[in-house]
Amino acid sequence: MRNKKAIWVTQTAMLIALIVLSQLLSRVIPTIPVGQFNLNQLVTGSLVNLVLVVGAYAAGFASAGTAAIISPILAAFLGIIPGKLPQMVPVVMMGNLVIVFITWLCFRASNGLGKGSATVLMIVGVVAGAFLKMVTMWAAVEKIVVPVLHINESLEKVLVGAVSISQFVTGVIGGCVALLIMPALGGLKRGR
């Protein structure tokens, strides 16, 4: 029992450390425009989602879910949160939990399937997780944060931009990179 707790704490701490490291990179990556996004957002967001998806696969929902909740709090302390609003922390938590939960469910369901079927289900999990993360965050901003905080129109555009298509794109990028490296994790069980 103690060994399982120690493993859980270690895995969770590693996930949190990797996410914080990814977030700290945003301080050194330039905000060069890349289409409607910027390089900083694409790299940082993709790395965070990569860690969350690999965490769901390798460590399971409890560990990756804990990292999904704690990392936005740390991001707020580091000043890395959309619109620099601490009220965005719960929005980011919800989005992170959604991608972790959906990918974890699909990874678990893929256990025991043939390689082709398992791969398809894991790809569906990544795309669905990224899409539902985007929808969750967008709805929370549009229906709760903006009306409750009486956000002005210019900040609303920034917040909606930060939680809309960019969340889907970085979720898919991070998730696809995760799918490419997960076979190297070999002995780890899918979705524990």
Image: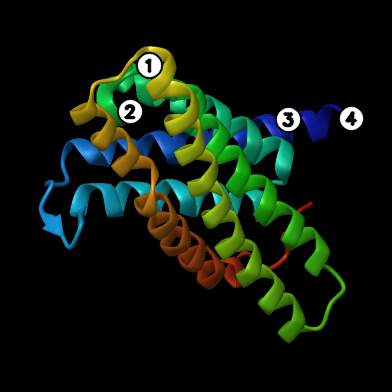
Q: Residue at x 36, y 48 (%)?
A: 45
**Crowding near the residue tagged with mark 2, few <14, some 14–19, many ≥20 C-alpha atoms within 10 Å:** many
N-terminal label among 2 and 4: 4
N-terminal label among 2 and 3: 3
Q: Secondary structure at mark 4?
A: loop
The disc label shown at residue 1, or none: 4
What's the amino acid at mark 1? Pro
Q: Residue at x 35, y 52 (%)?
A: 166
What's the amino acid at mark 2? Ile
Q: Secondary structure at mark 2?
A: loop
What's the amino acid at mark 3? Ala
Residue position for label 3: 6
Left or right: 114, with 151 as reference point: right
Q: Is the Cβ of the residue at disc 1 closer than 8 Å to that at disc 2?
A: yes
- In this rendering, the label closer to the viewer, 3 or 1: 1
- The percent position of residue 142, horizontal first and vertical second, equals 43, 32
- In this rendering, the label closer to the viewer, 4 or 1: 1
- The percent position of residue 4, horizontal first and vertical second, equals 81, 35
The disc label shown at residue 81, or none: 2
**Crowding near the residue tagged with mark 3, few <14, some 14–19, many ≥20 C-alpha atoms within 10 Å:** few
Q: CA distance from mark 3 to mark 1?
A: 31 Å
Q: Is the Cβ of the residue at disc 3 closer than 8 Å to that at disc 1?
A: no
What's the amino acid at mark 4? Met
N-terminal label among 3 and 1: 3
